[in-house]
């Protein structure tokens, strides 16, 4: 077992507050209690109705509701969970006090971590890397933003274990360490309600490579609008692989048609022919595949091992997920789509979309790109839902050329009925909202689950 001595030493003798008491906050509490059963601890959470009955712990204090985030500088360590924002805090928090599971795990296990981030595609890419490595018998675990707190896997680790870590911008925001192998897939406008500006969001994402040494490995998208400029701006010098559709200097993964070429200074090193590969549809997934192959090559896997893993990977729920074909209409669930670029990619990947469902919680991101795309590539039936959907429609109306049929509706049962009524045979209904879900759902998973249930129930 890989002992967490470094993390224990960081915690020992400290006055600690756990900020946010969801899945990761509870995991942090249990980890600390395992090694420090008598240590006084404070949990601070914005939920005034947070259930605490199961925690019969005389050394545990709860601060709940309004004012939960006050007086944080009174603590030596602030264990910040990813969902917590400091936007509304009206005083300066000393950043050296801020830590997290992600930060301590990266500091302790940096050489064993493969970190993956990006606005879109990080869950698919992380899962694909894990799947390929696992299929060859490697000792590998999957954790992080994928839903598994880092402290929960420490007991399962050895010195040889690789950890594929899906990392969100929230997790990376205050870290002081980077993974040995890091992947940055893309950068689009998202989470501006948390970061206040796109620049702050980009800087948080770049922390995945900021603390790497030259001998560490950084894989990034050379075609992205922002990443190459950030690399120039920060002048990071480390071993790298650039992937995209163009030929760059150094080690490059370049996709032309269905073939991915790996070249080193212009000389072809290896080729991966994906002709007839349907497990991950769409051009955007070819970027995810290139990144995954680059990592697996770096970890010593052979061409045949990588191709075998690719062939057996089935994709993830809520990511252009095929729900089923009912009354000769195919339904797809892409609830993970929370930005315009993701919706555009899904429409391009499926090609035969007849009905599109867009909208949800409005975080203030720009929708002109999506509107222009849909005006130039008309989809006859569109359901606009939530505040974001209403804003998309309003901005679209100012330009004209509206879809042939559309509704403005928040009730997904009525939206599904609209889809069954309007969609032509052998065409596609696509839920790809380009917006967050929490106008009426707990998360994108719940949105996707309800959509799938309604689709299936409506045809019975």
Image (cartoon, helix red, strand yellow):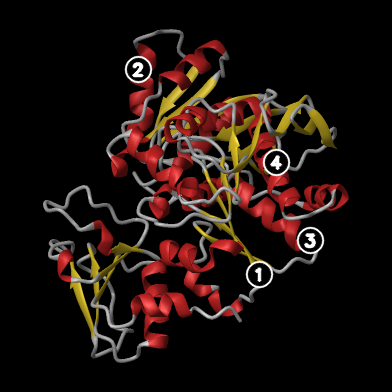
Determine whether the residue tagged by mark 2 lies in a helix, strand or loop. helix
Is residue 315 found left or right of 10 in the rendered image?
right
Left-right relation of 264 to 61: right
Element type at marker 1? Answer: loop
Q: Residue 360, can we see it?
A: no
Q: Are marks 2 and 1 in contact (CB under 8 Å)?
A: no
Question: Residue under circle 3?
Answer: 135
Instruction: Give the spatial CA distance, label 2 vs label 3.
Output: 48 Å
Of the two numbered discs 4 and 3 on the same chain, state the one appearing first in sequence: 3
Q: Does residue 44 appear in this view?
A: yes
Q: Earlier in the sequence, mark 2 or mark 4?
A: 4
Q: Which residue is drawn at 55% across and 73% down?
A: 153
What residue is pinned by disc 1?
161
- Quote the CA–CA distance across marks 3 and 1: 14 Å
The image quarter in which residue 13 lies: bottom left
Q: Are marks 2 and 4 in contact (CB under 8 Å)?
A: no
Q: Distance between the residues labelled 4 and 3?
A: 16 Å
In the picture, the quarter occupied by the N terminus is bottom right
Q: Residue 282's x, y, as percent?
A: 68, 32
The part of the image, by quadrant, that contains residue 17 is bottom left
Towards the viewer: 271 or 402: 271
Residue corresponding to mark 2? 395
Q: Name the residue under label 4.
A: 289
Q: Nearer the viewer, mark 2 or mark 4?
A: 4
For discs 3 and 1, the disc positioned in front in the rendered view:
1
The reply, left or right, for residue 192 in relation to residue 256 is left
Q: How many neighbours does mark 2 have within 10 angstroms: few (below 14), some (14-19), or many (20 or more)?
A: few
């Amino acid at each position: 077992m890989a002992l967490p001595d470094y993390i224990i030493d960081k915690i020992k003798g400290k006055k600690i507050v756990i900020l946010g008491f969801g899945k990761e906050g509870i995991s942090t509490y249990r980890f600390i209690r395992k090694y420090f059963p008598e240590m006084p601890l404070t949990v601070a959470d914005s939920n005034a109705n947070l259930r605490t009955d199961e925690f019969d712990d005389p050394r545990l204090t709860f601060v709940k509701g309004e004012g939960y985030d006050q007086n944080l500088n009174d603590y030596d360590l602030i264990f910040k969970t990813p969902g917590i924002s400091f936007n509304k805090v009206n005083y300066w928090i000393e950043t050296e006090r801020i830590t997290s599971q992600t930060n301590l795990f990266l500091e302790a296990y940096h050489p064993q971590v493969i970190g993956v981030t990006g606005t879109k595609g990080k869950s698919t890419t992380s899962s694909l890397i894990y799947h390929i490595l696992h299929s060859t018998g490697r000792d590998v675990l999957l954790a992080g933003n994928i839903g598994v707190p880092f402290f929960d896997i420490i007991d399962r680790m050895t010195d040889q274990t690789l950890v594929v870590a899906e990392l969100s911008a929230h997790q990376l925001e205050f870290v002081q360490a980077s993974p040995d192998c890091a992947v940055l897939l893309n950068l689009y406008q998202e989470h501006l309600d948390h970061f206040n500006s796109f620049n702050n969001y980009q800087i948080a994402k770049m922390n995945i490579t900021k603390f790497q040494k030259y001998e560490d490995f950084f894989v990034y998208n050379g075609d992205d609008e922002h990443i190459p400029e950030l690399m120039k701006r920060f002048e990071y010098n480390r071993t790298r692989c650039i992937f995209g559709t163009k030929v760059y200097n150094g080690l490059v993964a370049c996709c032309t048609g269905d073939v991915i070429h790996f070249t080193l200074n212009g000389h072809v090193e290896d080729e991966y022919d994906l002709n007839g590969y349907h497990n991950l549809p769409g051009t955007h997934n070819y970027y995810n595949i290139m990144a995954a192959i680059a990592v697996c090559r770096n970890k010593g896997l052979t061409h045949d091992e990588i191709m075998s893993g690719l062939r057996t990977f089935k994709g993830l729920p809520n990511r252009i997920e095929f729900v089923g074909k009912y009354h000769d209409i195919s339904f797809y669930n892409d609830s993970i789509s929370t930005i315009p670029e993701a919706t555009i990619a899904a429409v391009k990947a499926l090609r035969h979309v007849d009905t599109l469902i867009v909208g949800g919680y409005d975080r203030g991101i720009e929708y002109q790109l999506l509107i222009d795309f849909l005006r130039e590539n008309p989809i006859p039936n569109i359901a606009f839902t939530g505040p974001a959907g209403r804003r998309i429609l309003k901005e679209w109306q100012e330009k004209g050329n509206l879809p042939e049929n559309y509704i403005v509706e928040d009730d997904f049962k009525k939206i599904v009925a609209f889809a069954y009524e309007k969609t032509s045979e052998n065409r596609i209904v696509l839920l790809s909202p380009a917006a967050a879900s929490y106008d009426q759902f707990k998360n994108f998973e719940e949105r996707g689950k309800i959509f799938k249930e309604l689709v299936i129930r409506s045809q019975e």
